[in-house]
Image: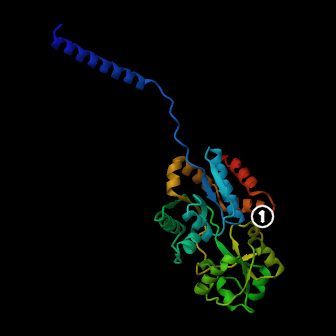
Amino acid sequence: MSAVRAIALALLATLAAGLGGCGGGDDAAKKPTATAPPPSPPAVRIGTKDFTEEDVLGELYAQALEARGFDVDLKRNVGSSEIIHQALDNGVLDMYPEYVGVLLSEVADVTMRPSSPDAAYRLAKAFEERNGFTMLAQTPFSDSNALAVKPSYAKRTGVRSIDDLKRASPRPRIGAPKEFQARFEGLVGLRRVYGIRKPRYRVLDFGERYAALDSGRVDVTVVLTTERQLSSRRYVILRDPRRLFASGHVAPVISRRVLQAHGPRFRQIVDAVSAKLTTDAMRAMNGAVDIDQRAPGDVAAEFLRRKGLL
């Protein structure tokens, strides 16, 4: 065999071996191999403020999501809007239910009142989206702040609206939670909007308000319009002709990053819960907790089962 032919055969053998190796690699690549499933997104951290209705709302959203397979870490009683929104900003929370008007006045510092609840919602949502968050659908119910008195006080003094308070004699004793002192929807707004400059003010725990009115310790207190106590005729809500208290529809505020990570089903579940929350429904659930002394989680579960959401 010539040297040239020997070299050619060696090259062919080398090439054949290379092709064989490549073929073997292709076959190996075609064999099914076990791959790890993509990691699940972390649990959604839902926070609530420090009063009954927020406890109920947190349970409603958390239980509905958990029933559909989402991991939820519910953090109860975080604090007022100012505190809980800061927790959201700091990345400690991913979502919490907020009142549109309170968000505008106490977080976004918008004291001009929008022309309608829908306009208020759009303004609040735009504010959140500038900061990496968004708002999901708002509820049918509106739980606004309001001022209430006993019927006997209204009859004795002629007070029927907030405007009347500055003419009442003696000066009315107003009782409310501590944050009311520094809020626009509080003493700040009463001074700026209604000219009520030096009320006699008493700090009350949230749960003390109605008892303080009933006992005569205060003449006026702040109430939430979905509280079951207001279904009776034991209290008079003062008219608010200058619209100090804004839209009280609730819309969950959520991190846009977290919402994207959990996909469209997450939004659909939360929006489905919100759509069922009427004024009558919230008054019934709030009363079941505050008056009937039932656990918020039990009250929420009963409502969700009745609505086919659990």
Q: How many marks?
A: 1
Looking at the image, residue 23 sits to the left or right of residue 149; the answer is left
Q: Measuring from the top left, give residue 236's x and y in whole percent.
A: 73, 77
Tell me if residue 113 comes above or below residue 310 in the rendering. Answer: below
Q: Quadrant of residue 169?
A: bottom right
Q: Measuring from the top left, give residue 62's x and y in whole percent.
A: 65, 52
Q: Is residue 148 visible?
A: yes
Q: Nearer the viewer, residue 32 or 297?
A: 32
Q: Which residue is mark 1?
A: 290
Q: Is residue 233 visible?
A: no
Q: Residue at x 67, y 50 (%)?
A: 63
Q: Residue at x 68, y 87 (%)?
A: 165
Tell me if residue 100 comes above or below residue 239 in the rendering. Answer: above
The N terminus: image quadrant? top left
Q: Measuring from the top left, give residue 182's x and y in whole percent.
A: 63, 80
Q: What SS does tag 1 mark?
A: helix
